[in-house]
Amino acid sequence: MNATVGAFFGWVIVIAYVLTIMNYIMKAVNKKWGKSIRKNEKLKGPWQALLSFIVKYHKLFGIITIVGILVHFYIQFNRWGFVVSGAMAAGLMIIQAILGGYGAYKKTRKGLWIKAHRTIAVLLFLAIAYHLIYVYQNYNF
Ligand code: HEM
Ligand code: HEM
């Protein structure tokens, strides 16, 4: 039972993480192609709705990743002990949430924090990919 719950929360983190980085991707696409998308009557509404959904709930998705990590960590740590690849991903994720919280508190999108926040978003991708390759090679599910 714990194995399924542990794996489930692993995937909760991955999905919530993807939703958080959509904040960057959607804004970038909007900047480049937003005008042409809005010219298309059929795409205009859904695009605008999706964009505001991703931006509006960015903080919530970030918080879900943290809750997911706490549960996943609790279960995996009790089953297998310390897992370096998991700890690296979780460590980056915690720094990421602290930075995001700082930016939200300061209410600014300028400065070192946002540069670090964007950089860590990419590093997290690598860390999660490494963790997945590592556990698939070293653990019997
Ligand atoms: C950002 C942080 C993390 C993410 C996104 C993540 C994600 C995942 C995912 C998706 C799986 C595969 C589950 C499956 O398909 O069965 C997994 C497995 C695993 N993770 Fe993590 N994990 C993270 C942090 C951690 C931490 C901190 C630990 C430390 C104990 C850990 C230990 C494990 C272990 C032992 C497995 C393999 C065993 C199993 O799934 O039952 N992970 N993780
Ligand atoms: C998995 C965790 C997270 C990832 C991968 C992530 C990623 C990102 C990225 C890539 C951006 C840049 C968007 C742009 O260029 O405009 C951004 C912006 C931002 N993030 Fe995060 N973030 C995470 C968690 C959080 C959390 C937990 C909070 C706050 C509680 C937060 C608050 C913010 C704020 C305030 C901005 C700037 C304004 C905005 O675009 O809403 N982030 N995030």
Image: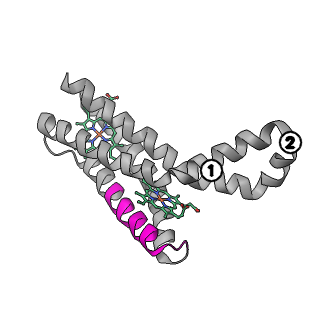
Residue segment shown in magenta: 93-109
The answer, for residue 136, to whether it is visible in the render is no
Mark 2, other Cα within 10 Å: few <14 / some 14–19 / many ≥20:
few
Which of the 4 image quarters holds residue 136? Answer: top left
Q: Of the residues shown, which amino acid type is indicated by label 1?
A: Ser
Q: Position of residue 50 (x, y in %)?
A: 64, 43
Residue at 49% over, 72% down: 107
Q: How does the figure colour the protein chain or chains? A: one colour
Q: Position of residue 114 (x, y in %)?
A: 50, 69
The Cα–Cα distance between marks 1 and 2, rounded to whole angstroms, is 18 Å
Residue at 29% over, 57% down: 91
Q: Is residue 101 magenta?
A: yes
Residue at 79% over, 39% down: 43
Q: Quadrant of the C terminus?
A: top left
Give ligand 1's quarter of the image: top left
> What secondary structure do most residues of the magenta stretch adopt?
helix
Residue 63 falls left or right of residue 19: left
Contact, mark 1 vs mark 2 (Cβ under 8 Å): no
Helix, strand or loop under label 1? helix
| Vertical placement of residue 25 versus 15, above or below | below
Q: Is residue 135 magenta?
A: no
Q: Quadrant of the N terminus?
A: top left
Ligand 2 neighbours mark 1 (CB distance < 8 Å): no
**Which residue in the structure is indicated by mark 1?**
52
Q: Position of residue 86 (x, y in %)?
A: 28, 46
Q: Of the residues shown, which amino acid type is indicated by label 2?
A: Asn
**Which residue in the structure is indicated by mark 2?**
40
Residue at 50% over, 53% down: 58
